[in-house]
Amino acid sequence: MPSETKVTDVGELPVDVLELSEIAFLSGEQGDDNDGGKELLNPDVGTSQVQSNKSSSLEKGKWTRKADIPFPVSGNNSACVVNGKIYVFWYGAFCEYDPSTDKWTKKKVDNLDLLTKKAPPSCSAVNGEIYVIFGSTVKKYNPATDTWTRKADMPTARCNLITSVVNGKIYAIGGELLWPRKKGLCSVVEEYDPRTDKWTKKSNMPKGRYAISGSALGGKIYVIASSSMLEYAPMTDTWTEKTGIPKWMSGLSTCALNGKIYAIGGYKKTSREFEPFSIMAEYHPATDTWRKADMPTARAYLSASVVNGKIYAIGGLISAPDTEKKETKIVEEYAPEPEVF
């Protein structure tokens, strides 16, 4: 664990949700109500160094509201990208988004009870095909033919896991045990090879975690759970602890772009109400440091995908005046400022 945490603070913390009047994954530890928006990291990680940098390229990126997803979605949805289109899976339904036309298309779920309320799905794309995992069931979806194929079951049945792809293999990480009788947090990591349709047991995470978020970058997988960050190297089958995510970023979604990991959204659960944040945090693996900037809509339990150098933040949970929280259809696109070399 690093002895010192370095964070660049970009801009002011937002307090509002944008355009709530237009509104039709990943639980963790609570934040400190006394942080005042300045003490950004888990104090257990180390000393925080918060600096101001208004000219950061992260702050200069542009957010744009896009077409709403057809149905409101929250933390139990999963998304992946094939041929420039985003596929979102969520409890018995899924749809396709084409950023080039800003249009959504509802797709058919196969007749084998693909997605159930018992097991939230996770999905990953390999060679133009999508592998959807829920419980122990694995289904392959071919977008080109709009067809489904049953694949070898995952050995450890679970939900609320993440899946990431490195070198053409899918890594199923963590989650919550479901069947046949077991329940509880899961530290299991299993590798799936689409070429052979076989699963292989890998080294467990340091401890069981569920409702986590993670992304692959540079041949490694970065997993965020609560306020911690873990790096998994499939080549050596080893885990390394990295600088922790800011504690207020529970309930976030991650994606990788331009050599960095982006953690988007999140919440702080107090005794009074659900408090989502409109915050994006950017992680630099080379320096093991974080910085942050604002995003338009405060939300948690969303999904995030990257197409053509832009990030798409989809759905999630937002605050609502009539209830503590509600699912949303909101989709927003983030275009980073071009890097100058």
Image (cartoon, grey):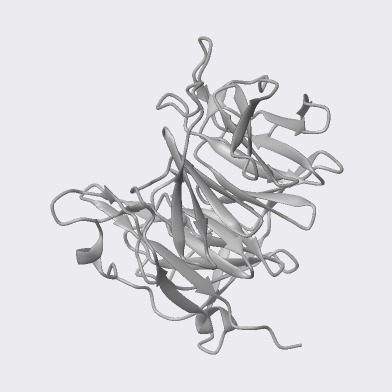
Query: Which corner quadrant of the image does residue 85 belong to?
Result: bottom right
Q: Residue 337 appears at what percent x and percent y?
A: 59, 83
Q: Is residue 42 visible?
A: no
Left or right, 38 with reference to 309: left
Total of numbered circles in the picture? 0
Q: Position of residue 98 (x, y in %)?
A: 53, 60
Q: Nearer the viewer, residue 232 or 256?
A: 256
> Which residue extends farthest front?
145
> Taking 37 as reference, is 237 above or below it?
above
Residue 120 visible in rendering: yes
Residue 220 horizontal side relative to residue 140, left or right: right
Q: Residue at x 61, y 34 (%)?
A: 147
Q: Residue at x 34, y 55 (%)?
A: 329
Q: Position of residue 173 (x, y in %)?
A: 64, 36
Q: Is residue 304 above or below residue 16?
A: above
Q: Position of residue 63 (x, y in %)?
A: 45, 75
Q: Residue furthest right?
A: 236
> Against 187, is 3 above or below?
below
Q: Nearer the viewer, residue 5 or 213?
A: 213
Residue at far top of view:
181
At x 65%, y 61%, the residue is 256
Quadrant of the snapshot with the C terminus = bottom right
